[in-house]
Image (spheres, grey):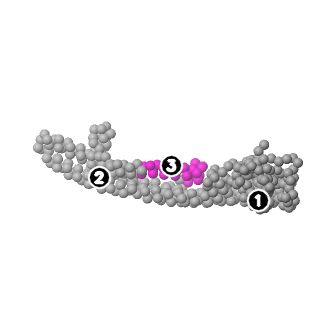
């Protein structure tokens, strides 16, 4: 009991001394031991890493789960160490509604059949989104959380301990300075000077040891960067896979819809230009889809002899090519971006295609690759 009381009194005394030293430093009434420039740079780098990791983590969580209520629910389940219940994605919910609508409106009607096909595609998109969220959470979010809840907490603990050791060291320096000032006035303070010097040496040793421990942890931030870099590559890989799956599913859907009578596929409006002409991946994602009617033309058009084709009496138009296009067969005309060609339509021809002429060459060209000029 007495030992515990003495320990509590000692701890209270140390806390009070540190508080006094900290307050006097703030008011400029006490000297403060400064850390070297390299150590300060390590501290600033660690703080920056922590702040940006938190921001990236939060925004990635928003990307994967835009619903704030759902994010709070997932956070609570995680803190309670319980499995997060499976949640239907928006795509899967849309697929369910479309399937139910098709059943009620008539699954054998053109609209009903199309609803069913789109429903199947949306279901696949929802499944792909679920896989992406799961993969991204494991490969990217979890390592970032582990850093903040593990490594960073350890660093913060050791930094607080270093701060306390510095306050103890500077308090000992202040006591020694006062003892030496009193010694100059009276010889009765020799013992106080010796005691203050011993306390200062002990405080300096503790401070140096703690500074080295903290320095090693701060230098370990570089290893955290390497790990975060690897996780970032994994995140990009999972995101690329997800968008590639979405593109493939929608391309398949468009082809299927092109086989349905009364279904409108493609557009005569000029498509948006690619975001980048130097990135194959980006270009593939933004390039307009070739109309699926290319291989589904009516019999009379399939047997069309290009040598016998002549411009209609209604006349022709000029068109500017928006993107490069590689002809799929001899009935099509290859295109180069920005070139001008002459185009016209023939009776009974698929509306997503036109006849294009460039010099003595002619062939079918997709409308979505053209900007028709007046």
- Horizontal side of residue 211 vs 319, given as left or right: left
At 24% from the left edge and 53% from the top edge, which residue is drawn? 202
Label 2 to label 1, Cα distance in Å? 73 Å
Q: Read off the magenta span.
A: 46-74
Mark 3 or 2, nearer chain start: 3
Circles 3, 2 touching at the beta carbon (< 8 Å): no
Residue 370 position in % (x across, y down): 74, 50
Residue 256: image tag: 1
Q: Quadrant of residue 214?
A: bottom left
Q: Secondary structure at mark 2?
A: helix
Question: From the viewer's perspective, is the residue at label 2 or at label 1 nearer?
Answer: 1
- Horizontal side of residue 159 vs 125, given as left or right: left
Please identify the quadrant where the C terminus is shown.
top right
Residue 207: image tag: 2
Circle 1 crowding by C-alpha within 10 Å: few under 14, some 14–19, many from 20: some
Label 3 to label 2, Cα distance in Å? 33 Å
Label 3 to label 1, Cα distance in Å? 43 Å
Residue at the disc numbered 3: 55
Q: Quadrant of residue 290?
A: bottom right
Residue 286 position in % (x across, y down): 67, 53
Viewer-closest of 254 and 302 = 302
- Horizontal side of residue 299 vs 322, given as left or right: right
At 69% from the left edge and 53% from the top edge, which residue is drawn? 287
Circle 2 crowding by C-alpha within 10 Å: few under 14, some 14–19, many from 20: many
């Amino acid at each position: 009991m007495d030992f515990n009381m003495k320990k509590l009194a000692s701890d209270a005394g140390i806390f009070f001394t540190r508080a006094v030293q900290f307050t006097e430093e703030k008011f400029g009434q006490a000297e403060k031991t400064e850390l070297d420039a390299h150590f300060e740079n390590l501290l600033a780098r660690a703080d920056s890493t922590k702040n940006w990791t938190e921001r990236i983590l939060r925004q990635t969580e928003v990307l994967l789960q835009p619903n704030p209520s759902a994010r709070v629910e997932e956070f609570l389940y995680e803190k309670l160490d319980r499995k997060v219940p499976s949640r239907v994605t928006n795509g899967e919910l849309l697929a369910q509604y479309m399937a139910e609508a098709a059943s009620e409106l008539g699954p054998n009607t053109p609209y009903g059949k199309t609803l069913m096909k789109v429903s199947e595609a949306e279901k696949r998109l929802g499944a792909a989104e679920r896989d992406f969220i799961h993969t991204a959470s494991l490969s990217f979010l979890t390592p970032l959380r582990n850093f903040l809840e593990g490594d960073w907490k350890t660093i913060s603990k050791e930094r607080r301990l270093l701060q306390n050791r510095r306050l103890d060291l500077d308090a000992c320096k202040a006591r020694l300075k006062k003892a030496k000032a009193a010694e100059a006035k009276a010889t009765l303070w020799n013992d106080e000077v010796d005691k203050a010097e011993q306390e200062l040496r002990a405080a300096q040793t503790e401070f140096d040891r703690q500074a080295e421990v903290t320095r090693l942890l701060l230098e370990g931030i570089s290893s955290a960067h390497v790990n975060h870099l690897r996780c970032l590559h994994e995140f990009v890989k999972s995101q690329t896979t997800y968008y590639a799956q979405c593109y493939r599913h929608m391309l398949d859907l468009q082809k299927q819809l092109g086989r349905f009578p009364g279904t409108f596929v493609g557009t005569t409006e000029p498509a948006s230009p690619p975001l980048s002409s130097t990135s194959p991946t980006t270009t593939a994602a933004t390039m307009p889809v070739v109309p699926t009617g290319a291989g589904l033309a009516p019999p009379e058009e399939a047997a069309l002899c290009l040598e016998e084709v002549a411009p209609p009496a209604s006349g022709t138009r000029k068109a500017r090519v928006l993107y490069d296009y590689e002809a799929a067969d001899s009935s099509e005309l290859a295109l180069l971006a920005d070139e001008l060609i002459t185009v016209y339509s023939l009776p009974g021809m698929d509306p997503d295609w036109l006849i294009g002429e460039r010099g003595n060459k002619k062939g079918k060209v997709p409308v979505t690759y053209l900007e028709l000029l007046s």
